[in-house]
Each structure stands twice: as structure tokens, then as C-alpha cells.
Amino acid sequence: MGVMKGGGGERVEKLKYSRMKLWMIRATTSVLLWTCVVQLMAVGETWGPRVLKGWPSCFTHQDSSFSVIEDKVLSVPARVLPPKRVYKNNGYLMVSCNGGLNQMRAAICDMVTIARYLNVTLIVPELDKTSFWADPSEFQDIFDVDHFITSLRDEVRILKELPPRLKRRVETGTVYSMPPISWSDISYYRNQILPLIRKYKVLHLNRTDTRLANNGQPLDIQKLRCRVNFSALRFTSQIEDLGKRVIKLLRQNGPFIVLHLRYEMDMLAFSGCTQGCNNEEVEELTRMRYAYPWWKEKIINSDLKRKDGLCPLTPEETVLILRALDIENSYQIYIAAGEIYGGNRRMASLASAYPKLVRKETLLEPSDLGFFQNHSSQMAALDYLVSLESDIFIPTYDGNMAKVVEGHRRFLGYKQTILLDRRLLVDLIDQYNSGSLSWNEFSNAVKESHKYRKGQPTQRSVIPDRPKEEDYFYANPEECLKPSSYGQVSSM
């Protein structure tokens, strides 16, 4: 009996040992499986949203907004995301953009490129809310922020906000803030900015306009600027859908020209250009110029500035140029601009010569634009979309929208953009108005001088030590263009 008991105890011990061994095998196998899953997600992540959807959130990466994307999986076909770029993070870069929509758009492209080059994490840029337009829009009100983050994840890590431990620094005002030097080479950011980021962990750049040089940058830098501009910066679905509606309404009535008539109050006050304005209007514009301290030029000779080609064409001058270029009055003319200074009085000659004069406000119902009221950047986004799709784009001043749209239309196949030589044109206009030139002489001179100013392929001009005077990168990003697309240019 004692032997029997002893044998039974031995069998019990063996059974316990076998069960423990089986449990250890299962536990080890589970750990290995989970390790493989996590590694696959970290390295590939292309499978993540499809294979692992529905799994606990602790196995997904929150900083790429997967939760938003996964919510749409059932209703939208799965989009293959680029794999994340893995790099040692040198710190966090915060940026506050300044200026209007297109000035900020170019700045965002530069800041993404700089963040990528410095191997830092970029926080979604803050948009300007204190400029003349006082637009309260946030980044996500204008651009598709989730697309922005995910489409660039193979280049740079972008977060919607700082991690909590660092966010407290912003709340207490202890983040190091500075404006970078304008038109700087990328080496400036490596040698001057990167050490500051490493030192403070978080750096805030409080001005972003034209902070990266047009020329002399590595090819991959230039191409990334283009990728952000033409691919990553997509407007919200609300803006895109309304833009498509406007374009459809225009297309139903035939070809259309977008006239970027930069004759709003802020432009005239800033530039000091008062051609055609009465004394009361001149005084109003002067008061406005002195009211904004960041507009540094105060005493301006409007006549001299106009003769130098530094003023936007007036509506009356624009009519003469359109007619001289043989733009038929059967064309629809879409005005891409804010409120024209002087209103109907200044627009009368243009409306008379081109009866198919339209704006977004005349094509859409007030209810369609209600959401966009007092949001000038969102209104400008609509004009941007329509400008890209027009048969011809004609800016009357080479501001930021004119330049960025010009470059985007080049990228889309050198779509025709008539780049007006204002210095030459105001001289021709004055000669015609004084009777020195007949209409035919005037018209022929205008057409001949603009034969090669229609957005054709050309090399960007480089002027060492004078970056403001050379061609703007975003107006002619030649490193990203296909010369063979020139054949798609339409004749006027």
C-alpha cells in the first residue's frame, strides 16, 4: 500500500509538471506572437488599419490619428498609408504662421521640410489670427489635418499637439520663441536652429514667411516642398465640395477666366497705390497704413510706384489690357478677390465690357457661404480651387496668391497663366490715353510683350544676395515640373 501511495504521488507530481510545462509553452508562444505583431506594426504599419482594426487601442499608434481613419474603414475603401519613417527625435518644433492663406501655405511647406531635415517632430502649425483679416480659422478648419499628418509620415512625425509634459511649458510661457532669419539656407537651420531645439527640447518659430531660400537647396529639399504643397495640403471636404460646385456652375456656361483683381482696401493701403481714388479715399487709405505698425513703409509716392510697376492694376486699367489681349466678351470672368475698393463705381467699366462677370457670391446662395463669412482664408481657399481649374488665370498683382497659383498651374501641366508686365503696361496705357498710341498700336504692343509670359517652362531667375528680387520658388518650382507637359498649354 505504501508503495502504491508513493507511485500515485509521483504520477501527480509528473502531471503537475507537465501542466506547468504546457502553460509555460503557451505563455512563451503568446509573448512571441505579441512581439511579432508589435514589430510588424512598428515597421510595416501598412497592414495595421486592415488586419488589426477592432483590436484594443493599446496596440495602435495614436499620434497618427488612426482612430479617425479606422472609423471610416467601413464606409470608405482602405487607403494604403506610407510606412512611418523611423528616426531619433531631436525635439519638437512649433510654428506660428503669419500673413494670408497663401503666404501661410508656402510657409507650412517650408516648415515641414525644415522639420524633416532636422529630424524633429513638427506640431501642426498655428495659423495667423491677428493680421488685417482677423480670421479665427484653425489649421483643421482649412486643411484636412489627418491627411496632412498621415500622408507625410514617411518623412516626418507630425502631432496635433505637444505631449502633456511639454504642453505645460507652453501654458506657463516658458517655451523658447524666436523668428528665424528670412531667406536662410537649410544649413542655417542645421547650424543655428537645431542646437536650440536640442537645448530646449521645444522651439517655437513665431514668424514663418519666406524663411527658406528659393535657390541653392539640395534637390530632396526642393522636392519635399513640392510634395507638401501639391499633395499633403488638401483643403477640408467642405471647402473642396463647395469649390467643385462653383467650378461645375462655371463649366456649364462655357470657358472661364479667373481674374485675380487685387484691388482690395488692405492692398491699396499697404502699397500706397491710389490711382483713380478720390481725395477722401486717399486719406482713408493713408490712415489705415499708419494704423498698422508692421507696415513699415509710410510715406509713399503713388505715381512713382505705379510707374515702377509696383502697384496692382486698377479695374479700369485691367479692362484695357483684357481687350488688348483679345479676350472676347463672351468669356465668363470670375473675380477671385475680396471686396473691391470703391465698389460698383470702380467695377463699372469692367462689368460693361464683360457682362459675364461673376463671383462666388453671385454663383452661390447666401446660405452656401454662410459658414465662410468672416473667414477670409476659407473664402480665399475657394478662390484658389477655382483659379487652378480656370482656362486662363490672370493676376493683376504678383502677390502670394498669384505666385502660388502660378506655380501650382505649372505643376498641373503648364496651364495658361498670363503674367502681366505692369511696368511696361502702365507706360503703354498712359501713351494710349494721351493719344500717342492708336488702339491697334497699343493692342499689338501688349500682345507682343506677353507672348512669352503665359506660364511656359522657364528657368527660375537667381539674384545672389537679393532674394526678394529673384523668382519665387513657389511660382516656378522647376525641380518638380515635367518639361514635356508644355504641349498642354492652351492658346488664348
Image: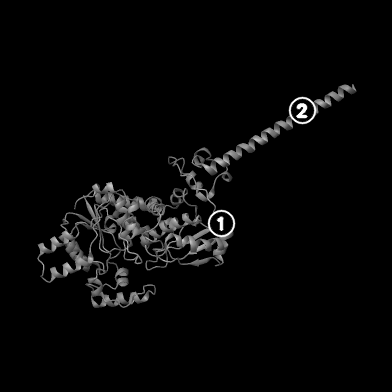
Classify 82 as above or below 350. Answer: above
> Is residue 442 rendered to the left or right of residue 78?
left
Using a 10 Å C-alpha cutoff, classify the residue at mark 2 as few (fewer than 14 neighbours), some (14 to 19) or many (20 or more): few
> Is residue 140 rendered to the left or right of residue 63?
left
The quadrant the N terminus occupies is: top right
Q: Is residue 383 visible?
A: no
Which of 416/380 is in front? 416
Question: Residue 29, percent across and down?
Answer: 64, 34
> Is residue 487 rendered to the left or right of residue 47?
left
Q: Residue flagged by tag 2: what amino acid is it?
A: Leu
Q: Residue flagged by tag 1: what amino acid is it?
A: Pro
Q: Which residue bears the numbered disc 1?
A: 163
Question: Residue 211, percent across and down?
Answer: 41, 63
> Is residue 265 rendered to the left or right of residue 203?
left
**How are the colours assigned in the image?**
one colour
Q: Is residue 193 visible?
A: yes
Using a 10 Å C-alpha cutoff, classify the residue at mark 1 as few (fewer than 14 neighbours), some (14 to 19) or many (20 or more): few
Q: Which residue bears the numbered disc 2?
A: 15
Whole-angstrom CA distance, mark 1 to mark 2, is 51 Å
Q: Earlier in the sequence, mark 1 or mark 2?
A: 2
Classify 285 as above or below 394. Answer: below
Question: Residue 98, percent across and down?
Answer: 41, 65
Helix, strand or loop at label 2? It is helix
Question: Residue 229, percent across and down?
Answer: 38, 54
